[in-house]
Image (cartoon, coloured by chain):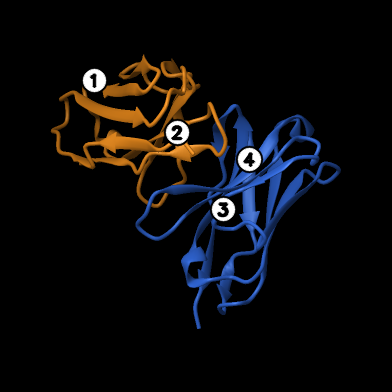
Amino acid sequence: DVQLVESGGGLVQPGGSLRLSCSASGFTFKIYSMYWVRQAPGKGLEFVAGINNKGENTEYADSVKDRFTISRDNSKNTISLQMSSLRPEDTAVYFCVRENWYFDYWGQGTLVTVSS
Amino acid sequence: EIVMTQSPATLSVSPGERATLSCRASQSVASKLAWLQQRPGQAPRLLIYATSTRATGVPARFSGSGSGTEFTLTISGLQSEDFAVYYCQQYNDWPRTFGQGTKVE
């Protein structure tokens, strides 16, 4: 079965940094693009960042560009999201998502809270 | 970016009834439209892709239709587990964008 397990969430002060990780299993990781999608409390879904299967191409939402960096390690079946200069509006559950053109598998998410 | 607009925001229906949810794109997405279901406290789950193809394990009471800019998700004979929030998502262009969701209560 496809499994995506996120980790690394927590409480961080405004301006701080945090690194999220996603461990994938149950499929051939290296052939899929992967994404981070977030959901602020009580709100809808927002694309954050994506990376193609080889890690050569990345895409970011305007709201996180120049602050967040997505990366992947195909030898370890993991993706990461390095988040810096965090703002209160970055508070959300962050989901790791597999893309098969559409977003077909989602992790359970990890909560990031940005607050002083 | 392509803006996805869902209506209504909330849909009140009774078990056994039919629910019809709408999704409109600000420009054509061809047939590259997916529907996701999110139950309280859970991650989103893919229901339908390519406008009308049900994902693995999705019951036949869920059906999708439309093309271009207008899409519909129909749930026939609502069951208790279907009360949730439903999102449409386009994957025809970057960035991938979602509707704001329809809550079926």
Residue B8 visible in the displayed image: yes
User: How far separated are the C-alphas under marks 2 and 3?
Assistant: 18 Å
How many residues crowd around disc 3 within 10 Å: few (fewer than 14), some, or many (20 or more)?
few
User: How far separated are the C-alphas under marks 1 and 4?
Assistant: 30 Å
How many residues crowd around disc 2 within 10 Å: few (fewer than 14), some, or many (20 or more)?
many
Q: Is residue A91 left or right of residue A33?
A: left
Subunit bearing disc 2? B
Kindly identify the amino acid type of the residue bearing the numbered disc 4: Gln
User: How far separated are the C-alphas under marks 3 and 1?
Assistant: 39 Å
Task: Verify CB contact (< 8 Å) between mark 1 and mark 4.
Answer: no
Q: Is residue A62 left or right of residue A34?
A: left
Residue A1 visible in the displayed image: no
Most foreground residue, B76 or A61: A61
Q: Which residue is mark 1?
A: B76
Q: Are marks 1 and 2 on the same chain?
A: yes
Q: Earlier in the sequence, mark 1 or mark 2?
A: 1
